Image (spheres, rainbow, N blue to C red):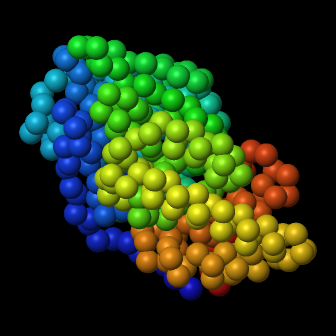
Amino acid sequence: MPAFASSGDLEEKQQTLEIVGDGVYALTAEGDPNVGAIEADDFLVCFEAMATPTAARQWLARLREHTDKPIRYLVLSHYHAVRVLGASAFGADVIVSHANTRALIEERGQQDWESEYGRMPRLFKDPGSIPGLTLPTLTFTDRLAIDLGGGRFLELHHLGRGHTEGDIVAWLPDERILFAGDLVEARAALYTGDAFHREWSTTTLDRVAALGARTLIGGRGPVTREVGAAIRQTRDFLEVMLREVGAAHGRGGTLKEAFDAAHAALAPRYGGWPIFEHCLPFNVSRLWDELDGVERPIIWTAERDRAVWDLLQS
């Protein structure tokens, strides 16, 4: 059996800081979670918080080589621990998320913290630096605009349920730059363990595509100017899962049979991409629940993680 989730992935990844527009920054790291920042006239908006304050401070040290503006807003694309638990390092005046994201943190944030720490220990640099759960201080449901000054606005949009039920994107319409969170990945496998597969693969991605971005920073993978290709890759991954798991479910097969079929269909194209083997058991388990009529994802705990892994990766 392979090492549990990403627990065997202990090599540091090479981080790349890219200036993708005037005062627009993206930090990528060979398939680790991406983060970013946008300069306003006299403040910064940061996008995503990393897994611990110590990890976040390393990112901020690189950002400070380019700008010393204070951080007014920290935007969280969704509730997962590796995206939010570093928030205290930013000293932001306002922490922004979708209303569902705050509710999910309150409902299942502690379990998600324990789950993700077990799955991806390398991302949790100095876990003792985490002061506790991160609670957003400003929430919205559909759209929120942040005035950057000089006639520029950063638009935050909830485009539908997808990776979670609270995903948001950050959109710079003048520059046509999109921070997509985990709704779109560029040359990285998807995690769908808390997803709404049918909605994500159809209306949500349709709305992402309709923005017309020219540059996209996905949740993982490199910055891409081949935006259509990244959206198609994300949609294809979901559609293959829906087809293979749906066929096994429809004929009265087992969860293990569904996993094996999905793995066989996806691995030729996606098997070499970051976190593919880690994610697929949890992806298939959630989709199976969805096909059983379980509307909201079941909470992942460290114990449930291990049980699903042992069943499907054996």
Q: From the top left corner, tell me how far across and down residue 142 is, in percent.
A: 58, 24
Q: From the top left corner, tell me how far across and down residue 91 is, in percent.
A: 28, 26
Q: Which residue is drawn at the image coordinates 30% and 33% (left, top)?
A: 175
Residue 100, quarter of picture = top right
Q: Which residue is drawn at the image coordinates 85% and 77% (left, top)?
A: 253
Q: Is residue 250 left or right of residue 142?
A: right
* Residue lying farthest to the left in this orientation: 65
Q: Which residue is drawn at the image coordinates 33% and 45% (left, top)?
A: 215
Q: Is residue 111 above or below residue 245?
A: above
Quadrant location, the N terminus: bottom right
Residue 302, quarter of picture = bottom right
Judge by depth and name the residue closer to the eye, 10 or 196. 196
Quadrant location, the C terminus: bottom right
* Residue lying farthest to the right in this orientation: 252
Q: Is residue 289 left or right of residue 231?
A: right
Q: Is residue 50 visible?
A: no
Q: Is residue 5 above or below residue 84?
A: below
Q: Is residue 261 left or right of residue 148?
A: right
Q: Which residue is drawn at the image coordinates 51% and 62% (left, top)?
A: 233
Residue 251, quarter of picture = bottom right
Q: Is residue 109 above or below residue 68?
A: below
Q: From the top left corner, tell me how far across and down residue 237 is, in percent.
A: 58, 64
